[in-house]
Amino acid sequence: MNLLSLFSGCGGLDLGFKRAGFKIPVANEIDKNIWQTFKINNPETYLIEDDVRKISQENIEPFFNGEITGMIGGPPCQSWSEAGNLSGINDERGKLFFDYVRLLKEIKPQFFLAENVSGMLAKRHSVAVKNILNLFEESGYNVSLTMANAKDYGVAEERKRIFFIGFRNDLNIAFKFPKGSTADNSKKLTLRDVIWDLQFSAIPAAEKNYHNTKAINNNEYFIGGFSPIFMSRNRVKSWDEQAFTVQASGRQCQLHPQAPKMIKFGKNECRFVSGKENLYRRMTVREIARIQGFSDDFKFIYKNVDDAYKMIGNAVPVNLAYEIAVAIKSVLEDKF
C-alpha cells in the first residue's frame, strides 16, 4: 500500500504509517531546515524539496509502482481558518489547503488523512470546518472528523489533534476511529516511563543555542531566560504525569520534571520554588523526541537547536499515527 505524504516535516506521521506496513515512495516538505533530517531517516523515500503547489499527479506517478493507496499530511493551520468563506484560495497560506484538495481530486487515492490542531473545532471556526468537510465530500469521499488525545494512543503527552479521514465513496467503507491502546488511565504512559534515563546525560546547548557537539544523541536543551508569558503559569509536569503538548519552540519548551511545580503568586504570575532554581531547565531535544514517540535511532540534524524543537513540536506523535494507520489498513484489507 503506497502513500503520498504532504507537509511531511521530519516524518512523525510517515513513521507511524510505515510501522503499520505502508510504503511512502514520495514525500514533500518545503522547509530546508528539515530536509536533511527527513532524508537520513527515510532513505527509501524521494523527497520533493519544493512548494506543494508545484506538485502534480504527473510528476509523482513515476515513483509509484501501481496505485497510490492513500494521501496523508497536515496543511498548515492558517490555511484551514482561511477556508471559512473559501476566500483563502486568494491567500498564499490558504492556497496550501486548496492544493491538498486539488491533489486529492487528481490522484483519487482510496483514502486520505488530514491532521491539524484541535483549535479548529472552536465555535469561531465552525463555518470553516463545515466548508472543509463539504470540499472533501465533493471530492468523492466519505469523511469522518475526530479529535484525539495522544495520551490515549501510547504517547506520554497531553496533545489534542483533529483528523479528517476519508475513504473514496465507491469503496463503501464506514470507518471507525480507533479507541486507543492507552485509553484506560491504568495503561497510560508517563514521563517516568519514557525519559527517566536521559536526565543523567543532558547538557545545555552551545552559545547562542547552536548545536553542542558534546551532546550525546541530541540530548541538549535550549538555554536563555524565561519570558513573563512563560512564567504566567506552571510549566512543570511531575514524573508520573503526561507531558504538556510539545511546543515547536525551544524558548517555549516545557520544563523538566526533576523540578518541583511552579508556585502561583498571581493571576498571571508563577515562580520557581526558592532554593530549587537550579533544577528548572527546559527539556532536551532528545527528551521531547522520546515524548513524541521518536526512537533513539532517529537522527535529528540541525545547527540551531531551535530548529530541532520546531521540527519535533510540529510532528504527529508516532504511536498516535501508528494506531490510526493500523485501523485504516485493517478496513482496507477487509475490503480487498
Image: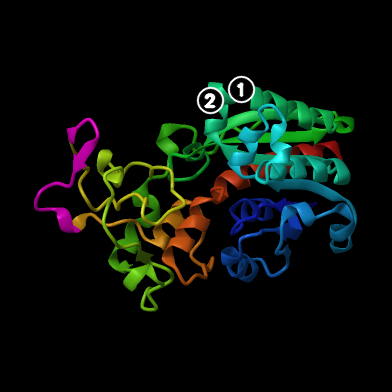
Say the numbered circle drawn on residue 116.
none
Q: Which residues are magenta?
A: 265-278
Give the residue number, with chain letter if any, for mark 1: 126
Left or right: 255 in relation to 68: left
SS under mark 2: loop
Give the residue number, with chain letter if any, for mark 2: 122
> Badge 2, how many Cα within 10 Å: few under 14, some, many 20+?
few
Q: Quadrant of the C terminus?
A: top right
Left or right: 291 in relation to 227: right
Question: Gap in Å between the C-alphas at discs 2 and 1?
Answer: 7 Å
**Residue located 54% across and 38% down the image:** 181
| Amino acid carrying mark 1 in the image | Ser
| Amino acid carrying mark 2 in the image | Ala
Task: Residue lying at the far front in this picture: please name it.
Answer: 90
Q: Is residue 92 above or below residue 177?
A: below
**Residue located 61% across and 43% down the image:** 323
> Residue 139 at x, y = what percent?
84, 33
Whether residue 64 is visible, yes or no, is: no
**Residue located 66% across and 52% down the image:** 7
Q: Do callouts 2 and 1 mark residues in contact (Cβ within 8 Å)? A: yes
Task: Residue lying at the far left in this picture: please name it.
Answer: 275
> Depth check: 58 or 15 in front?
58
